[in-house]
Amino acid sequence: DAGVTQSPTHLIKTRGQQVTLRCSPKSGHDTVSWYQQALGQGPQFIFQYYEEEERQRGNFPDRFSGHQFPNYSSELNVNALLLGDSALYLCASSHLGAGRTEAFFGQGTRLTVV
Amino acid sequence: QQQVKQSPQSLIVQKGGIPIINCAYENTAFDYFPWYQQFPGKGPALLIAIRPDVSEKKEGRFTISFNKSAKQFSLHIMDSQPGDSATYFCAASIEGRDDKIIFGKGTRLHILP
């Protein structure tokens, strides 16, 4: 089992650009959550996807959007990048239905905005 | 509003010592309290978790103490080893409702050999 995989591992973008980050959940998981972890801080919840719908959202602007595909993989899109968007973006997967599981985190995508 | 407050920010302990990390929460609806361990360049990994109907939980060298009335919980690491050097996060969530995890700001732990 490959666990939660994220791509790319590192990314450098220019202010104002758009970025797409990708996540493949652990086998058997149906739910994907995205977190932003600024340097020296704890992860902050961005949003969660279940059954291809955004189930809930944290306190992030609409520049942050996402998608979940029928195979449960997910994308995080950030438009009009700001310097402050530089962070480690973490994807976590879990199983939300019967026999719910803990959340497993991927290694993250390190985004640097210059 | 920070819903989970964690202290200390950093901690240095001699090998074999017992580092203690403390957390406090505000929302009484939280019903699941996990601790995560994160090594540089890695995502957080679940270490141990507790629910509020239990006052203590042990898994190997890791122990969570939970005080529901004070809305506080803590992590103790027995016989600490240099390999335990990492950043530790306490967290909380409402499992039955929203499942999102609220993290503390983290404690950077260094175990001296």
Image: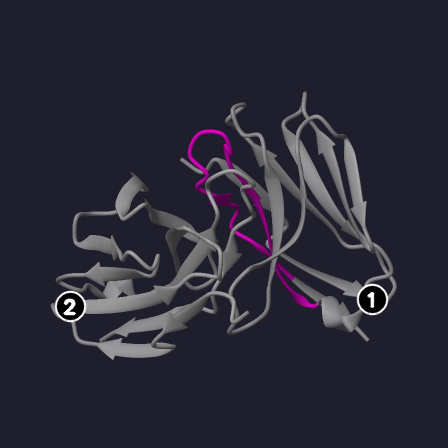
Residue A105: image location, x then y, percent: 49, 60
Residue B99: image location, x then y, percent: 46, 39
In the depicted structure, whether residue A109 falls above or below residue B52 = below
| The quarter of the displayed image where residue A90 is located | bottom left
Q: In the image, B87: left or right of B57?
A: left
Q: Is residue B93 magenta?
A: yes
Q: In the image, B14: left or right of A66?
A: right
Q: Residue at label 1?
A: B14
> In percent of the image, x 51 and y 34: which residue is there?
B95
Q: Residue at label 2?
A: A18
Estimate how packed mark 1 is, as few (under 14), some (14 to 19) or many (20 or more) residues with alpha carbons within 10 Å: some
| The quarter of the displayed image where residue B52 is located | top right
> In percent of the image, x 51 and y 74: which residue is there?
B41
- Label 1's element? strand
**Mark 2 and mark 1: span between their CA atoms?**
46 Å
Which quadrant of the rendered structure holds the N terminus of chain B? top left
Residue A80: image location, x then y, percent: 12, 62
Dots 2 and 1 on the same chain: no
Q: Chain of mark 1?
A: B
Can residue A59 be seen here? no
Region of the chain picked out in magenta, as a range: B85-108
